Amino acid sequence: MLNKNLFLFLKGLAMGAVNKIPGVSGGTVAFITGIYEDLINSIKKINFHSFKILFTRGFKDFFEEINGKFLTILFSGVIASFFSVSLILDRLIQDYEIYVFGMFFGMIIGSFYVIYYQLEKINLKSFLGLMIGLSIGLFISFADNIEIANSNLIIFFSGVIAISGMVLPGLSGSYLLLLMGNYTLIMVDSVNALYFTLIDIVSFNFEFINDPERLYLLKVLLLFTIGSVTGLIFLSNILSTLLKKFKTITMSIIVGFIGGSLLAVWPWKKENMNGGNSLFIPDILSTETLVTLFYIFIGILFVVLLERIANKH
């Protein structure tokens, strides 16, 4: 029993790690490791019926109804992974930003390739879905130009959207955050802020209360968490229904969305006079460009191989 719980915790660690990497879905890891069906079924049970059990029969029956032991161990691993991976990503983005985004770019291309070949056929319905997804992707790519990325409402809905990667294999929640312009804010800065706050509290150091930036980041994480819990409960039912009844157009929209959003994660960019980013074509013969291209290739290869392993299972 201990080994079973330990392995379940380790699977949670893996899901949490890949959920922070744009282009890879935690749902894919759940699928590979054989817990996807249990995950979806357990999440679906968190509904009005289970809460009725909570208030009429008590917490113990509620915990058993939603497969609470399974969810607790799994998400303990996910949460623990979020902190550890966040600190590593923070350092990598600071020191090797172009290489990190090169790998992100490659992972997203790999995800686009994988999901595209999940389309059953190209017809009018799927073409319409592609165009809808393409339009949404292009819109989000330029979202920072209309300044919606960091509002409280957007952060809340970022949580709702990002958690979709946990319940839908092939769709990366972190990738969606990257496109919306708040990946670093939520998945790196705010998670690190919570980590350092917990350390301060354990050390009886409460000076962070007077730190406006720390408090802002904690508020961001709170809004994101509320959105994530909301999305986890409702999207697991909605997404499974959409894929069951409208699989072709749903997958088409996802493919179009990814294709239309690639510009937002182009590794070669520089800050312009207006504070925004301008994309440019790099010198193909420079060492930095060649190394970045190598990381793009590694990103593509990683996602494609991961998906092929999932298909074998």
Image: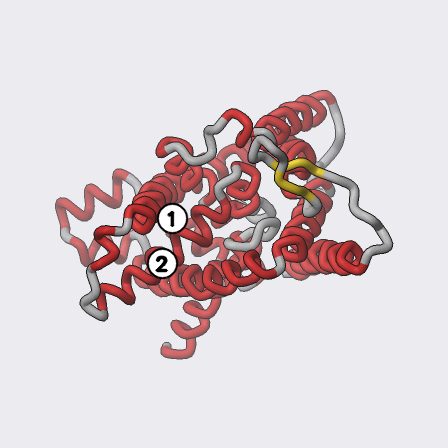
Q: Tag 2: residue type? A: Leu
Q: Position of residue 20 (x, y in %)?
A: 51, 54
| SS at badge 1 | helix
Question: Is any part of residue 33 visible from this angle?
Answer: yes
The colour scheme of the drawn protein is secondary structure
Q: Earlier in the sequence, mark 2 or mark 1?
A: 1
Q: Residue at x 63, y 35 (%)?
A: 272
Query: In which quadrant will I find the N terminus?
Result: bottom left
Q: Tag 1: residue type? A: Ile
Q: Please identify the quarter of the rendering in which residue 18 is found.
A: bottom right
Query: Horizontal placement of 293 versus 154: left or right?
Result: right
Q: CA distance from mark 2 to mark 1?
A: 8 Å
Outermost residue on the front side: it is 273
- Residue annotated with mark 1: 43
Q: Please identify the quarter of the rendering in which residue 302 is found.
A: bottom right
Q: Position of residue 176 (x, y in %)?
A: 54, 41
Q: Residue at x 66, y 42 (%)?
A: 270
Q: Residues within 10 Å of mark 2 (few under 14, many from 20)?
A: some
Query: Horizontal placement of 181 versus 116: left or right?
Result: left
Determine whether 181 is above or below 22 in the image. above
- Residue annotated with mark 2: 71
